[in-house]
Image: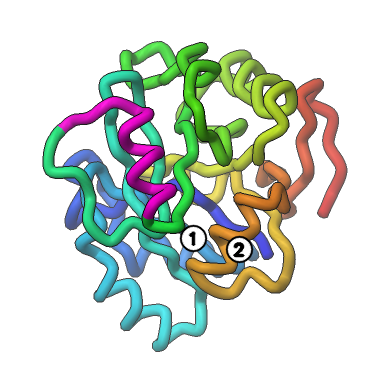
């Protein structure tokens, strides 16, 4: 399974210029098997996503990107999102209680939304976005190295807000990932490999930037 784990659609993310339908059909063209819609502080696209998933047979997981006081996290398995800004530890505690997972988004991006080394202070951590499509490589590389150091899942996501960004990075997961529950299981158990789209194929990228086709 190849899943772009971080995308924003235009209805509920005001800074996005792509619709849910455009995301899905472009992702299918690129050879992806699924996407995660992670709108800013919103999971309201879920019902529409479920309808489109039935129509297309293409996996659509609805999460959300939540800005905490320390930085952004993408969350999955959380039906009710926080109604106000909270600390990252509070968010991970809420997600854990719900049986979901939270992933530190683009931790070393320099726009006051990356969590940076505060990640080390979290008592609970499932994953780090090692490859983000809107982040410079040296910041991605640092995030990748931190995921390896801490022994947590490393994920890849495009963070797409425009059509040309879709699928730039993705995450390779086992074929048994078929829904939100199995996606969460894969992240918790470390069955994730960040990949990059290059010349029509997805390739595994390690933190030294060597590649191998998948």
Residue 198: which numbered mark, if any?
A: none
To which residue does mark 1 refer?
35
Q: Dot 2 surroundings within 10 Å: few (below 14), some, or many (20 or more)?
A: many
Residue 17, x across and y down, in percent: 26, 48
Asked if the residues shown at circle 1 and circle 2 are in contact, with their CB atoms under 8 angstroms apart, the answer is yes
The quadrant holding residue 169 is top right
Where is 172 relative to 118, above or below? Answer: below
Magenta stretch, residue numbers: 85-97
Observer able to see residue 35: yes
State the residue at coordinates (42%, 79%). Answer: 53
Which SS does the magenta portion mostly show? Answer: helix
To which residue does mark 2 refer?
32
State the residue at coordinates (35%, 23%). Answer: 71
- Most distant residue in the left direction: 83
- The figure's colour scheme reads rainbow
Q: Dot 1 surroundings within 10 Å: few (below 14), some, or many (20 or more)?
A: many
Observer able to see residue 163: no
State the residue at coordinates (57%, 38%). Answer: 127
Q: Is residue 118 magenta?
A: no
Circle 1 sits in a helix, a strand or a loop, which is it?
A: strand
Question: Is 10 positioned to the left or the right of 20 in the image?
Answer: left
Where is 82 relative to 145, above or below? Answer: below
Circle 2 sits in a helix, a strand or a loop, which is it?
A: loop
The quadrant of the rendering that contains the C terminus is: bottom right
Question: Is 123 positioned to the left or the right of 70 in the image?
Answer: right
Between 47 and 8, the residue placed more toward the observer is: 47
Q: In front: mark 1 or mark 2?
A: 1
Residue 72, x across and y down, in percent: 36, 30
Question: Is 153 positioned to the left or the right of 26 in the image?
Answer: right
Residue 202, x across and y down, in percent: 72, 51
């Amino acid at each position: 399974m190849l899943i772009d784990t971080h995308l924003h659609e235009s209805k509920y993310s005001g800074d996005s210029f792509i619709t849910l339908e455009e995301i899905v059909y472009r992702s299918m063209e690129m050879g992806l098997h699924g996407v995660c819609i992670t709108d800013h502080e919103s999971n309201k696209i879920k019902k529409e996503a479920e309808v489109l998933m039935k129509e297309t047979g293409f996996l659509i997981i609805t999460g959300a990107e939540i800005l905490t006081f320390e930085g952004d996290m993408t969350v999955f398995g959380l039906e009710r999102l926080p109604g106000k800004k909270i600390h990252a530890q509070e968010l991970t505690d809420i997600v854990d209680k719900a049986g979901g997972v939270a992933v530190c988004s683009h931790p070393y991006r320099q726009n006051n939304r990356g969590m940076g080394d505060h990640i080390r202070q979290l008592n609970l951590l499932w994953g780090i976005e090692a490859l983000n499509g809107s982040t410079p490589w040296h910041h991605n590389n640092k995030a990748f190295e931190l995921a390896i150091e801490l022994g947590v899942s490393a994920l890849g996501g495009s963070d797409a807000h425009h059509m040309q960004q879709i699928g730039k990075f993705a995450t390779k997961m086992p074929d048994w990932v078929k829904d939100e529950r199995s996606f969460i299981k894969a992240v918790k158990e470390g069955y994730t490999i960040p990949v990059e789209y290059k010349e029509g194929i997805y390739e595994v990228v390690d933190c030294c930037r060597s590649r191998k086709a998948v």
